[in-house]
Structures are given as structure tokens and as C-alpha cells.
Amino acid sequence: MSSDGNKRQFWKRNAAKVPGSIQHVYGAQHPPFDPLLHANLIKAGNKPPPATPGKPKKATTFQEFESTTSDAWDVGDDDDELLAMAAQNLNIEVVMETANKVIENHSRQQERQRQDDTTELEQREEEEVAEDEEEDEEDEEDRVEEGDMTSPEVSLASQSSPYTDGRLVKSHSEAPIGSPKDVAGEPAALHRQRSLPHRPPLIPLVARMADQNTSGTLAMTEREASRLDKFRQLLAGPNTDLEELRKLSWSGIPRQVRPITWKLLSGYLPANAERRESVLQRKRQEYFGFIQQYYDSRNDEHHQDTYRQIHIDIPRTNPLIPLFQQASVQEIFERILFIWAIRHPASGYVQGINDLVTPFFVVFVFEYIEEEVENFDVSSLQEEALRNIEADSFWCMSKLLDGIQDNYTFAQPGIQRKVKVLEELVSRIDESVHRHMQHYEVEYLQFAFRWMNNLLMRELPLRCTIRLWDTYQAEPEGFSHFHLYVCAAFLVRWRKEILEEKDFQGLMILLQNLPTMHWGNEEVSVLLAEAYRLKFAFADAPNHYKR
């Protein structure tokens, strides 16, 4: 392009601010504001372009147009004039002096920060070493005094975060970043870490299996011991009275007998004690026959979408509990869900079904271990035990889903129907809550769909879900019918908090994040008692909840 200033400019017509013009940025990388210089630059920027002598000849070809045109980026443009004027008016000594001061200040700040980080790191390391020594001494004293008897529940009682410094770090990117000296000290820290006793990962409160209402000790109360004796006497008979077992199980099942009780109440095992072992062997063999027959087809064209969705959902299942993040456990869940999906083509796999495996799996693991299950490494179990847990979980989950399969067929009509009944029920038992949600245009389907789809498993800690399912197993149509009244009681339980919210967004945030992480058996028992009261009042009189 031509740099002749007399030529007419096509892209710019007397514009003071154009692309490429100097824009002041006052800060660490720019000299201090100089009013005199600024005035000169403004004058230079507003200087009118030289007059164009005569009328230019109209371009008839692109070459002629190009030869008579210049743009804002032309090297001969008045931006160069601005740069030249700025260079003439700037005092180089002042600029250099200011830049040096900024660099010196920045260097001093970095040095102070580095020294502070080093001091803090050294103090923290000294405190950790001192704490470790004290804990080792206390552990040694406890082993001497108590004969090396420790409680796994006590070790979980004071843990609140999977990382140090008492705070929860959600991902590696949120972990504290050390200074260069921290990196240099890594070998020493690694040596200290290897010399310390192994500690299992800390489990957040919401993911702990131990009931938060108990003291954390292994000792049972007199009432608990009496209930356990009743269960054992009932189960020891040649033919278990299932009706009596349901009555006894309604208010909770002791952990020691929960596996056998769940298998009986779900219909997986017969009441006749002599037939149980043969039935178990036959059903377990049948399940692994399905594995051999169907599991290799998971990558076939007509099954790969189902398997891919299962494979995606499994890692999301109870992500806070290390047990479910073990590769062998996730493989077990994948096999269970895939086999169930292809054997039930009317519904297939639906997101949410993956949650329903976890209570059965945890309960049946307890059949083979005494310690707490959150950090338990399933690879330490014998292969036969793992196979039994997998097959039993599959069959009991299948029995549960047989009663609520319309929740997962096309368009999920079972859930749609239950949410509608829930809305009618709440409008009768607590009209204030119902009208409050209507006023702020909150639809029940927006929050209660998940309550029905996942059986409240996303709203309650897993320990509470297991206690809740004790009653569901004991209650006729517990998962399909009684669950509706539990949801109604659960919603009204938060009446005060709901009425305090004064907009749609606040209500939805509350209803999707209800504060139940501290709940235990006591809260679940109160919820179930209220649900039973609602069922007693409304179940046999459906017109009570019709307007």
C-alpha cells in the first residue's frame, strides 16, 4: 500500500480512536500519568488529516483502487506520528526509574511471601510430627490397657474431611499449592509419610454408615440385645413366621441379622430353613449363567448404548464413599445392572436404578465382615464370598424392581401417577405448604420426581436409606405404596424452612438440598411414624385427599 499522506483513506475518516492507536493503561507497566503528555497526545490524535488536493480519479480496477487506498494499519498512517511524539515527550530517565522501583517493590513482596510460606510450612511440619508422636503414644497405651481392642466407629466420629487442615477439598485442583521450597522438601515429607502408620481416608459425615445418634461404641443397650435375641430365635426355627418377622423388622433390624432378614422379606429365600441352602446355590448359579450367556454382548450394536450409560453412571454412585470407587466393586455393579436391563426389555436400564443396588451390596458385605464398610477393601474377601454378594444383590434388587417397574417403563407412568397423588395428599394434610408452593409456581414434579425415581436415596445418607428399607421390606407394598406417605411426611417435615423461602429459586434450592447429613435412626424412625399415621388416615379412604 502507498504511504502518501495526501491520498484519501478508505477505512478511516477523521476518527480519533482507531484500531492500533495508543490507549493508556496506567499501572505497573506504564509510566505515571503526565497531564502535559496526555494533552499533547490528545491534540495529536485530533489533528485533522492533510487536505486532499483535487478530486481523485474514480478507480476502475482493483489495482487502481488498491493503489489509491490506505487503511488504519498502514505503516505511513498518523499512528506513527503519535508514537514519535510520545517518544519525544517521554523522559527516559523517569520511565526507567519508575520501572526499577516497581520491579524492586515486587521482588521484596515475593521474598517476604516466600519467607512467610517457609516459616508456616516448618511450623506445620513440627506440629504434625508432634501430633503423630502423641497419637502413637496414646495408641500404645490403649493397646496395653484395653488388650488392643479398638472401635472402628470411634475412629470415624471425629473425621470431617478427606484432606488435612480440617477442610474438604473437592478436587486436586483445589488442594493448596506450595512454594518452590515446598517442592524441594518433598523427599523429606515423603520419608516422614512412609514412616507414619497407615491411616484410611477420612469419610464425610453424610457418607458414614455408623448411626449418628449412637455413642460410637460397640456395646449394645439392653433393649438392642433383647431385640437381637428375638430375631435369632425367630430365624432359628425350621419354618420362619414371615408375618411375625415383618412386625419385628418394622422398627429396624439389627445389623447382625439384617442380611438373612432382607433375603427372607424380599422373597429371595424360602421360609423353610432346610430349603434355603439349595435355593441359594441354584439362584447363584443361575445368575452367573446369565453372565456367561449375556455379558459378552455388552459391546454389540443393540446393547452398547445401555452398557455405555451404565458405565458412565457407576462412578457417580455414592462418590463420597471409597468402597464404591473400587474397580472391582464398579465391575460388579456393571454386571448386575447390565444383566437386569437386558432381562427386562420393557424398561431397560434407566438412570437411578444404579442407586438401588448399593443398599443390598452394603448389607450383604456385612455378612462377611465385622468392621465398618466405608473403607473396606473388597479384594481382601475370598472370591466365593464376592460372587455370593454379587448374585444375592442382583436377585434382591430384581425382587424390589418387580414391584415398581412401571416407574421405569416408557414415560415412567408410575412416577407421574405417584407425584400427582403426593400433590393431592399434601394439599389435604398441610394446605399452607401446598399453597405456598403454588404461589411461587413450584411444581411437585420438579423436586418429587427424584424422590420417587431414587426412593429418596439422593436425599438421605446411605445409613438412613438402609434403616428406611428395613421398614419398606416389612411393610406390604413398602417400596410402591408406603413410600408415597414417607415422601409426604418428608416434605411436611421441612414446613418451617419451606414457608421461610420467598421465591422460586430459594424453594428449589432448599428442596433439592435438604439438610439431612446429620440424620440417623432416630430421625428416620420419627419420619416413618408420621408416614404410618398418614397411611392409617388416608390409605383406606382415598376420598380424603380428593377435593
Image (spheres, helix red, strand yellow):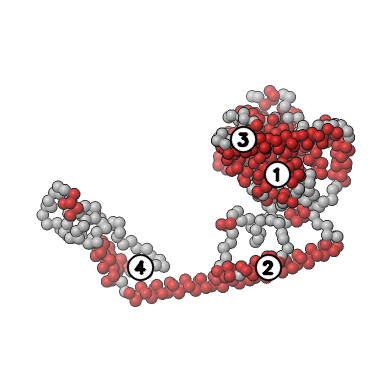
| Dot placed on the residue nearer the N-terminal end, 4 or 3 | 4
Please give the residue where the numbered disc 3 appears in the rendered image: 349
| Dot placed on the residue nearer the N-terminal end, 3 or 1 | 3
| Quarter holding residue 187 | bottom right
Please give the residue where the numbered disc 4 appears in the rendered image: 33
Q: Is 2 displayed left or right of 497 in the figure? A: left
| Front position in the image: 211 or 466 | 466
Q: Amino acid at mark 2?
A: Arg
Residue found at x 24% / y 65%: 81
Does the residue at mark 2 contact the one at mark 1 (Cβ under 8 Å)? no
Please give the residue where the numbered disc 2 appears in the rendered image: 192
Cα separation between marks 2 and 1: 36 Å
Between disc 1 and disc 4, the foreground one is: 1
Between disc 3 and disc 1, the foreground one is: 3
| Dot placed on the residue nearer the N-terminal end, 1 or 4 | 4
Q: Residues within 10 Å of mark 3 (few under 14, many from 20)?
A: many
